[in-house]
Amino acid sequence: METGDIGGLAAGSLGTMADAARIRPGGWLLASDVEGPLFLGDFIAEALSACLAPAAGGIDAAPSYGQILYAEGYAAFSADTEASRRPEGAGRRETRPEGGYTLAQEGTDTIFALPLLLAAGADYACLERLALGSRETPGAAEMARRLDQMGWQRAGITTAPQQPYRAVAERCGWLSPGRLLGSPFPLREAEALLRRLGRWDVEIAWVRAYLRDAYELIDRESEVWMDGSTRRRHFSDAGRKRLRQRFRRLYREELGISYTHGERAARPASTALGRIVEACAMVGDRAKAALAMTLARRAGGPDRLVTMGDGANDAAMLRRARWSIGVNGPDAARAARIGLITDDMRHALVLLRLIGEQAGGIDAVVGLAREELGGAALVHLGGEGLTPELAERHRQMKRRLRGEFVTY
């Protein structure tokens, strides 16, 4: 396969993405994760849940087939990349933070959904319909409008597919689509390329065989019961182990996908679909941080940047910024300067206003925000000293707002 065949499927450079955001010089900039602080849910998990199920005889239960496939694929990938992880900034593997946030994921696991959705017949229209069903995080729209009045600029940075969320941004009206920066997800282009190369039938057949095996395994290794009006599914530990093995067989052996940059440089994928997956430069941990810092330099400078996120894949972006808010997520709170537990993003506006008014250092801002918010939200100092009690309160709020099957 010629390099040019797949070159057009990768995301543009970070500089090109930053140029498209058209950030103006001067003032404060909020660079925020999209899923969690701005919109609820987990787009890839929701897309797999909507599109993946047996053609006949499937059992509709929670978690769904697609949610299990995504969660167990993520777990298998995480286990396989354990040895290559390193803490952000430290450079020494033995100093991994308690929360486990590292630079290993890099968004790579998100693109693993591409072959599954191709095999299921999903298209851009399907993904856009799912994205347009995303609910705004309570208070996010009002937070955005108030920041506009305060002269702040805003950018959304996400590992999730860029284009469907740009449709959401255009609909909601309070986030410029051009300032929503995310990962490529080339469904149509990938199918066209596979067909042009004569590889569609054989390679998609491998993915469909994996899905059939996975569905059978989930049905065989699950217990299903009614919990009120909800049908629940418990997938056994033995089933999880076998599904992860089957995941590895598809991605590592059949598609020949490598997990690290060094491995890919030495051994490109042996299949067209594998090379497509490898070619998609995902907006992962480091890319999020780099984009935030690049946008900040084009605005008021790094000292006038605030980053915000709720997951482990936001940790690098949160750690690099002088001002950062980890909202409704223990890994994010450990990485950020300030932690916030809230069911209304207007409470984050209090912190942003105090930061913009230069009300003092981190301690002063946290203290003033606590006084102003009272019991409406919980504000605390971030960092690796996060107590188990605070970590659990973050997890509970995240589950309450985003659902119980969010991967990150």
Image: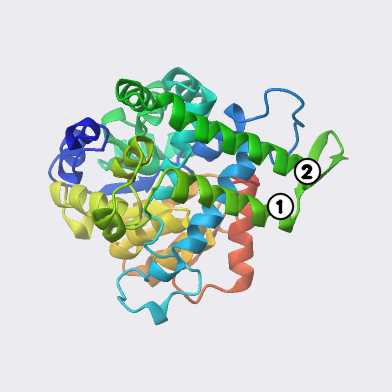
Determine which quarter of the picture holds residue 261.
Answer: bottom left
Q: Report the number of numbered marks.
A: 2
Instruction: Describe residue 405's horizontal placement relative to residue 366 as left or right.
Output: right
Instruction: Describe residue 252's horizontal placement relative to residue 272 as left or right.
Output: right
Position of 337 relative to 247 (above/below): below
Q: Earlier in the sequence, mark 1 or mark 2?
A: 2
Identify the residue at horizontal 44%, vertical 63% (top origin).
81
Report how far apart the C-alphas of labels 1 and 2 lie in the structure: 8 Å
Query: Which is nearer the eye, 141 or 326?
Result: 326
Placement of the N terminus among the 4 image quadrants: top left
Where in the figure is residue 287, as x and y percent of width and height?
Answer: 28, 52
Determine which quarter of the picture holds residue 13.
Answer: top left
Label for residue 220?
A: 2
Identify the residue at horizontal 57%, vertical 59% (top origin).
374
Around disc 1, counting alpha carbons within 10 Å, would you say few (fewer than 14), some (14 to 19), or many (20 or more)? some
Q: Secondary structure at mark 1?
A: helix
Marks 1/2 in contact by CB < 8 Å: the verdict is: yes
Amino acid at circle 1: Gly
Label for residue 339?
A: none
Where in the figure is residue 240, as x and y percent of width and height?
Answer: 67, 54
Amino acid at circle 2: Arg
Identify the residue at horizontal 46%, vertical 60% (top origin).
332
Instruction: Describe residue 405's horizontal placement relative to residue 277 as left or right.
Output: right
Around disc 2, counting alpha carbons within 10 Å, would you say few (fewer than 14), some (14 to 19), or many (20 or more)? few
Identify the residue at horizontal 40%, vertical 80% (top origin).
95
**Is residue 28 visible from the viewing direction of this image?**
yes
Instruction: Describe residue 89's horizontal placement relative to residue 230 as left or right.
Output: left
Where in the figure is residue 80, as x and y percent of width and height?
Answer: 48, 62
Q: Secondary structure at mark 2?
A: helix
**Is residue 40 visible from the viewing direction of this image?**
no
For mark 1, what is the residue? 239
Where in the figure is residue 36, as x and y percent of width and height?
Answer: 49, 45
